[in-house]
C-alpha cells in the first residue's frame, strides 16, 4: 500500500524523495523494498518516549512565558538568563527556540524591522547612454601589497567603455571627476542617465553624490557584497584581465598602467567582437551601426543557403540585432528586434 501511494504521488508530479519523506521513509528504504518485491512493513519504531521529552503542560508553559508582556520582545537567549536570575528554570534556549518554531512563533521579536536586502530596481536600456555601470578594480604594482586602481564605466546597451582612469588610491573625488568627464564627452542630458555601481565608499561618497545630483544623473546601487547585481562591470573586468595582452608582470608606475589601459580600451571599443551583442564591436553598437552590419551578415548567409540549401536543415544563423538590455531584470520575455533592411553605404 505504501509503495502504491508513493507511485501515485510521483505520477501526479511529486518528487520521489519528497514522497518518500511524507511516508516517513528514506528513498533508499523504498528502493530496498522494491528490490524485495514489497512484503511486510517490518519497521518497529521507538517503543518508548525520550526521557527528556517535554510534556504538553511544559510545552504550553514555554509558550506562555515567551509570550508574556515582559518577555515578548526578547529572544530566548535573554529570557532564559532572566528566569535564572529569578531562580526559575523552565527550559534551555534551544528548547525555547524549538518550541517557538514548531508553534510558528519563531519570528523577529521587537519593534525594529529585520534587516532585508531587496534586489536593486530593474533598469532597461533601449539605446546608448540610458544606463551605465561602473566599478573599480585592482591592478598590481611593482610594490608588494600596493595596487593601482582602475576606474571604469561601461554603457549597458552598447558595452562601450565610456570613461576610465587609473589612480593610486580609491577616492570619491576621482569617481566624481570620471563621471563628469564621461558625461561631458557623451553629451548626456540631465535626468536621461542612470548610473549603477557597487556600495563602496568611492561610489557613495558625498563628493560623488553631489556631482551626480548636479549633473542630473540618477544613482543606482547594488546590494552589499552581491557582485551579481553589477554583472556588466564584472564581465568587463574579466575580459580585461584575461585578454592575451594583459601584462604578466606588475605595472611599475601609474603611467605604465594608464598606457596599457589606453591600448586595451581602443582595442575593446573598436576591434573586439562582443558575444553579447551579436559579435559587433561596442563602438559600432554605440553608434547604431550594428543594424546594417548584422543585416549584411544575414544577406551573406541567405545567399549561401540559396547556393547550397542542403547544408542547412532549418533557418540560417540568427543575425537579428539585440533589443533592449536589462540590468537586474525581473523575469521578462525579451523581444528581439526584427531584422532591418540593409542600407547601402
Image (tube, grey):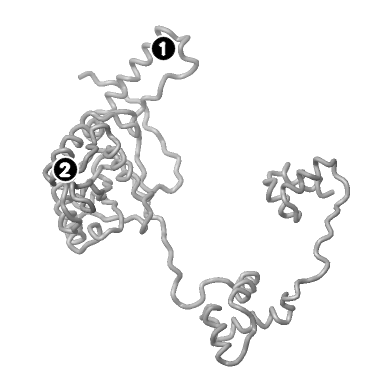
Q: Residue at x 64, y 84 (%)?
A: 90
Q: Position of residue 338 (x, y in %)?
A: 37, 28
Q: Is residue 201 left or right of residue 314?
A: left
Q: Residue at x 44, y 72 (%)?
A: 113
Front one among 168 and 142:
142
Q: What is the total number of numbered labels drawn onto the structure image?
A: 2
Mark 2 = which residue? 257
Q: Secondary structure at mark 2?
A: helix
Q: How many angstroms separate mark 2 from mark 1 (CA)?
A: 48 Å
Question: Which sits earlier in the primary sequence, circle 2 or circle 1?
Answer: 2
Q: Secondary structure at mark 1?
A: helix
Farthest top residue in view: 307
Mark 1 = which residue? 305
> Image height check: is 107 above or below 260?
below
Front one among 238 and 279:
238
Farthest right residue in view: 40
The reply to whether discs 2 and 1 touch (Cβ–Cβ < 8 Å) is: no
Q: Is residue 194 left or right of residue 30?
A: left
Please tell me in which quadrant of the rendered image residue 244 appears. Answer: top left
Q: Rate crowding at label 1 as few (under 14), some (14 to 19) or many (20 or more) other CA atoms within 10 Å.
A: some
Q: Is residue 324 left or right of residue 64?
A: left
Q: Position of residue 322 (x, y in %)?
A: 35, 33
Q: Residue at x 73, y 47 (%)?
A: 28
Farthest front residue in view: 144
Amino acid at each position: 500500500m505504501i509503495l502504491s501511494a508513493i507511485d501515485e504521488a510521483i505520477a501526479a508530479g511529486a518528487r520521489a524523495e519528497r514522497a518518500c519523506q511524507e511516508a516517513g521513509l528514506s528513498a533508499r528504504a523504498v528502493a530496498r523494498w522494491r528490490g524485495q518485491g514489497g512484503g511486510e512493513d517490518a519497521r518497529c519504531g521507538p517503543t518508548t518516549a525520550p526521557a527528556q521529552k517535554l510534556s504538553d503542560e511544559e510545552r504550553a508553559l514555554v509558550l506562555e512565558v515567551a509570550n508574556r508582556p515582559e518577555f515578548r520582545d526578547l529572544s530566548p537567549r535573554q529570557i532564559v538568563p532572566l528566569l535564572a536570575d529569578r531562580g526559575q528554570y523552565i527550559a534551555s534556549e534551544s528548547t525555547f527556540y524549538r518550541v517557538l518554531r514548531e508553534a510558528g512563533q519563531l519570528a523577529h521579536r521587537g519593534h525594529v524591522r529585520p534587516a532585508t536586502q531587496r534586489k536593486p530596481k530593474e533598469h532597461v536600456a533601449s539605446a546608448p547612454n540610458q544606463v551605465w555601470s561602473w566599478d573599480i578594480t585592482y591592478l598590481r604594482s611593482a610594490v608588494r601589497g600596493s595596487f593601482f586602481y582602475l576606474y571604469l564605466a561601461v554603457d549597458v546597451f552598447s558595452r562601450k567603455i565610456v570613461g576610465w582612469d587609473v589612480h593610486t588610491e580609491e577616492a570619491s573625488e576621482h569617481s566624481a571627476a570620471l563621471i563628469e568627464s564621461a558625461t561631458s564627452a557623451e553629451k548626456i542630458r540631465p535626468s536621461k542617465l542612470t548610473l549603477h555601481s557597487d556600495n563602496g565608499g568611492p561610489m557613495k561618497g558625498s563628493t560623488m553624490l553631489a556631482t551626480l545630483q548636479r549633473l542630473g544623473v540618477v544613482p543606482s546601487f547594488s546590494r552589499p557584497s552581491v557582485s551579481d547585481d553589477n554583472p556588466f562591470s564584472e564581465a568587463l573586468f574579466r575580459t580585461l584581465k584575461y585578454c592575451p595582452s594583459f601584462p604578466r608582470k606588475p605595472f611599475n608606475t601609474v603611467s605604465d598602467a594608464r598606457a596599457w589601459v589606453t591600448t586595451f580600451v581602443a582595442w575593446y571599443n573598436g576591434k573586439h567582437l562582443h558575444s553579447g551583442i551579436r559579435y559587433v564591436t561596442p563602438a559600432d553598437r554605440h553608434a547604431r551601426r550594428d543594424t546594417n552590419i548584422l543585416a549584411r551578415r544575414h544577406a551573406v548567409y541567405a545567399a549561401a543557403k540559396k547556393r547550397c540549401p542542403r547544408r542547412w536543415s532549418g533557418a540560417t544563423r540568427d543575425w537579428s540585432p539585440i533589443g533592449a538590455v536589462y540590468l537586474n531584470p525581473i523575469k521578462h520575455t525579451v523581444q528581439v528586434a526584427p531584422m532591418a533592411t540593409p542600407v547601402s553605404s
